[in-house]
Image: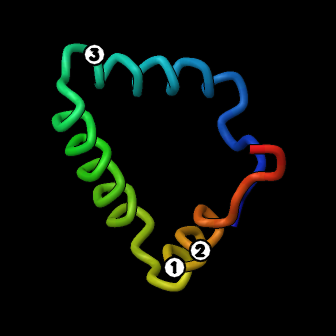
Amino acid sequence: MILEDNLGPEGDSIYTALMQAHEGLTEAQSHALNARLVLMLINEVGDADRIKAVLQEARTPTPGA
């Protein structure tokens, strides 16, 4: 599982594209977009064990958060 920055200089442009995808959406539409995005990315990974490990890691609180 990769937990450090893996996008390098493209990270900012990816973040911007994500924010633009949410522009003009209601909160419910934004949540639906996030759900579809997660399911599409899970499908791209296609490895159940990796996906389960990432889901567990995502539930772990970040120190200081």
Binning the other alpha carbons within 10 Å of mark 1 as few (below 14), some (14 to 19) or many (20 upward) gives: few
Report which residue position mark 3 lands on.
23
Q: Marks 2 and 1, Cα distance to the nearest angstrom? A: 6 Å
- Residue 25, compared with residue 1, is above or below; it is above
Which residue type carries mark 3? Glu
Quarter of the image where one finds residue 28: top left
Q: Position of residue 58 (x, y in %)?
A: 60, 62
Residue at 20% over, 45% down: 32
Q: Marks 3 and 1, Cα distance to the nearest angstrom? A: 30 Å
Residue 29, disc: none
Q: Is residue 8 left or right of residue 43?
A: right
Binning the other alpha carbons within 10 Å of mark 2 as few (below 14), some (14 to 19) or many (20 upward) gives: few
- The structure's colour scheme is rainbow
Residue at 49% over, 73% down: 51
Count every numbered label the image shows and give the total: 3
Q: Secondary structure at mark 2?
A: helix
Q: Position of residue 12 (x, y in %)?
A: 60, 20
* Mark toward the start of the polypeptide (2 vs 3): 3
- Residue 39, compared with residue 56, is above or below; it is above
Report which residue position mark 1 lands on.
52
Which residue type carries mark 2? Gln
Report which residue position mark 2 lands on.
56
Q: Are marks 3 and 1 in contact (CB under 8 Å)?
A: no
Which residue type carries mark 1? Lys
Residue at 77% over, 48% down: 4
Q: Are marks 2 and 1 in contact (CB under 8 Å)?
A: yes
* Mark toward the start of the polypeptide (3 vs 1): 3
